[in-house]
Image: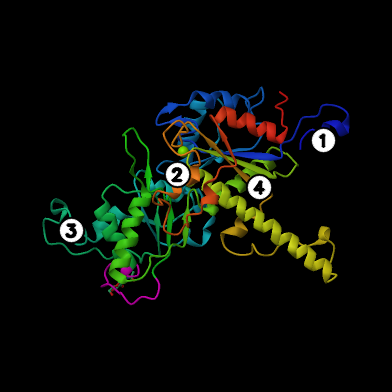
Amino acid sequence: MLCFQCFHAGLLLLSEPSFGLLFDIDGVLVRGKTPIPAAKRAFQKLVDAKGQFVVPVVFVTNAGNCLRQKKADQLSHILGVPISQDQVMMSHSPLRMFKKYHDKHVLVSGQGPVLDIAKNVGFTNVVSIDMLRESFPLLDMVDHNRRPKLPSLPVVNLPRVEAVVLFGEPIRWETNLQLIIDVLLTNGNLSNAYETALSAHLPLLACNMDLMWMAEAHSPRFGHGTFMVCLENIYKKIIGKDLKYEALMGKPSELTYHFAEFLIREQAAERGWRAPIRSLYAIGDNLMTDIYGANLYNRYLDERMARKSTKAVANMVTGAGTPASVPQEVDMDNGWESELASPSATSCKSILVCTGVYNPHMDLPKDASQCIKETVFHGHRDFRFDPALVEPEKIAEDVDAAVELIFEMEKFVNTV
Ligand SMILES: *[C@@H]1O[C@H](CO)[C@@H](O)[C@H](O)[C@H]1NC(C)=O
Ligand SMILES: [Mg+2]
């Protein structure tokens, strides 16, 4: 609530926002390489005369094979307003919080500048699949043309791999599948034989679980989620146990939204806005990622509020204090969560736009969840299908209409 201050002071003060915006990119702002016209109009409404944002804005994409700065530059060009890299969140961005792995010897899998990306999020000791392949030339045998021509011995001066990070789909799936399985089953030392009796495998962190994505072709294309299905099933088939992830990031994971909320809070603090950011709005075109993820995080925030008020009541009953003096919750005390401190947001509302994957004019049943319920579930193995989570809070024609709708809901006016 914004104009409370204006009334109070009796004059028009510069308004401070109490909400922040999370934008998906593909299908909302661009379609492939083509900008969606509504995007430019929407962003004119979000900046002042100097091109500064009047509300905190973060771009949340599951894309991952480039650096944040490159994405920020593309967005600045497309939207006609300056975007900083601190406003861009890629599927791998939350890795910055996993500090306990940053100095470990980590194997990374993906394509594009994976070593640079890994360094950029904080890893200091990284090995790529190609580097492993060169050190152990006898391992990658599927492609006959890539087998070693001469008898060769492994160069065994590599330190043991201590964790594996999956950034995105690689180019030669058979090579990555083979070497990742090798690393997991030798407990990080490829000179060893398989130890199939291991009680647990090395920590495994994965970014971007999208099974498929829409490119220029008529039918969807394999995404990183498809690669993960292969890896999970090969591991299970060989060992008889489930492959376990230390963390899954990228939409719809809760972790992604925790991190986005943190970026929103940081932006508000940097601008000197004192009003806490209470409401988040997540605008996207994909029910299974954007809407599911925002609703899942909203559910977390709801439960968190409920826990807080239960604690407050319990403390009152025991005479420990009034709600106002209840100490900050103590359940965020370890791991990555403590890196972020507690969220100020109390809700995260999902807004579906019709310029991307979701198309209301196609011959689909009206009820979105109905249409998904009757098909197979394309989400990740570790995410349950829940019809309530794919129900958007609002539907807007495009991103410009979505921004107008949010301004209305928040009674917000860009005064500049
Ligand atoms: C890997 O295992 C081999 C054979 O057991 C051993 O000689 C070597 O020291 C190990 N390397 C590391 C880095 O632990
Ligand atoms: Mg999208």
Query: Is 193 part of what is drawn in magenta?
Result: yes
Residue placed most toward the observer, 56 or 114: 56
Residue underneath mark 4: 347
Q: Are marks 4 and 1 in contact (CB under 8 Å)?
A: no
Q: Earlier in the sequence, mark 1 or mark 2?
A: 1
Of mark 2 and mark 3, the one earlier in the sequence is 3
Reading the image, the residue beneath label 1 is 4
Q: Amino acid at mark 2?
A: Cys
Q: Which residue is mark 2?
A: 371
Secondary structure category for the residue under label 1: helix
Q: CA distance from mark 2 to mark 3?
A: 44 Å
- The answer to which of 103 and 243 lies nearer the viewer is 243
Please identify, in this view, whether the residue under mark 2 or under mark 4 is nearer the observer: 2
> What residue did someone put label 3 on?
141
- Check the picture and name the quadrant holding the N terminus: top right
Q: Residue at x 35, y 43 (%)?
A: 112
What kind of residue is marked 1? Phe
Which type of secondary structure does the marked residue at label 4 adopt?
strand
